Amino acid sequence: MSEQLKQHRDQIDAIDEQVLLLVNERATLARQIGSLKDDGVIYRPEREAQVLRRLQANNTGPLSNEAVSNIFRAVMSNCRALEKELTIAFLGPLGTYSEEAALKQFGLGRGAVVCGSIDEVFRTLEANQADYGVVPVENSTEGAIGITLDLLLSSPLKICGEITLPIHHCLLSKQDDISQISHVFSHSQSLSQCHEWLNKTLPSAQREAVTSNARAAQMIHDLVSTDGTFAAAIASKRAAELFNLNILTENIEDDAKNTTRFLVLGKHDVAASGTDKTSIVMTTKNKPGAMIDLLEPLSRHGVSMTKLESRPSRQSLWDYVFFVDIEGHQTDAKVQAALQELQMRASFLKVLGSYPVAVI
């Protein structure tokens, strides 16, 4: 070993010791802060978002902002666990993108409640069998997740945060030869996100939708071929590791920027972080120009609308509810003024939650 290499490694060892001392000092302070809280709320998404934004703003590299976020999310997660190990419900089995989103937001210092459906995530939280839930709400390619929006309308749960996760699909199989694949299993959204790739690469393969990508990988792991036909799953790299499958091809999504947005659900309101979003759902009176009239207060009070999504209300034929995302927190003066006017103009309005805008 060269003397220069040894010097660098000695310096790294010394820095590691300093980092260890500082992280434990941080954990001690975090535990003291926890003992001062009087509302029992351990997870503070607004505070964590502020920490990550400040660190990213001060980051001079060579680590990327995303790497910095990953490191400090792990630190905050383990500090949080000194007060209580949070339980997070998400769509299973292990290996889904919902689990990846939960890992990204909450780190390893949390317990998993693996659910069989998005409905079950809501029911689990409402029954106090988990502290928080993570559910997909929209994909950049395929649009809104209808079942999530429908459940938000009727559920007492509140949106506490959002997570954006780049989605990179892999083709997984027990086989090594892609030309042998005759059946492809995955979630319906993933099949749609890989539609053109499948048309080009596996035009003759039958496609079958299942409840989740990880469930597809699990099926392929358990499948025994008796007639010489072979199957594959569209899922993540983590699913390949969990179910011991070969990755035949990576990044098979049609859009390289394919991203899914997830919501963090809980039972408490979230304070303002400084860069926030508010989600609402509302209906309008059935009269000409009602929708324009309903949205006018947003424009007049200078509140930007970032999303407008309609869903059947299920109350009467051709009756719709509108899901709207706006910039700002519901306690901000201009947002508060706009919401008060919307309340008077709408036939129904529900604030689903105010929460920090996702930090990469």
Image (cartoon, rainbow, N blue to C red):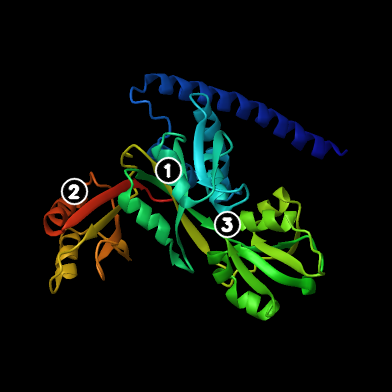
Above or below residue 132? Residue 85 is: above
Give amino acid for label 3.
Ser
Residue 40 screen position, x and y as percent: 37, 26
Q: Residue furthest right?
A: 1
Left or right of residue 325, residue 8 in this image: right
Q: Are marks 2 and 1 in contact (CB under 8 Å)?
A: no
Kindly identify the residue that appears in the image at 15 percent across and 53 percent down. 343
Residue 206 screen position, x and y as percent: 66, 74
Foreground: disc 3 or disc 2: 3
- Residue of label 3: 212
Q: Give the structural element (helix, strand or loop) at label 2.
A: helix
Residue 211 screen position, x and y as percent: 56, 57
Give amino acid for label 2.
Gln
Measure the alpha-carbon separation of dots 1 and 3.
Answer: 18 Å
- Residue of label 1: 123
Q: Are marks 3 and 2 in contact (CB under 8 Å)?
A: no
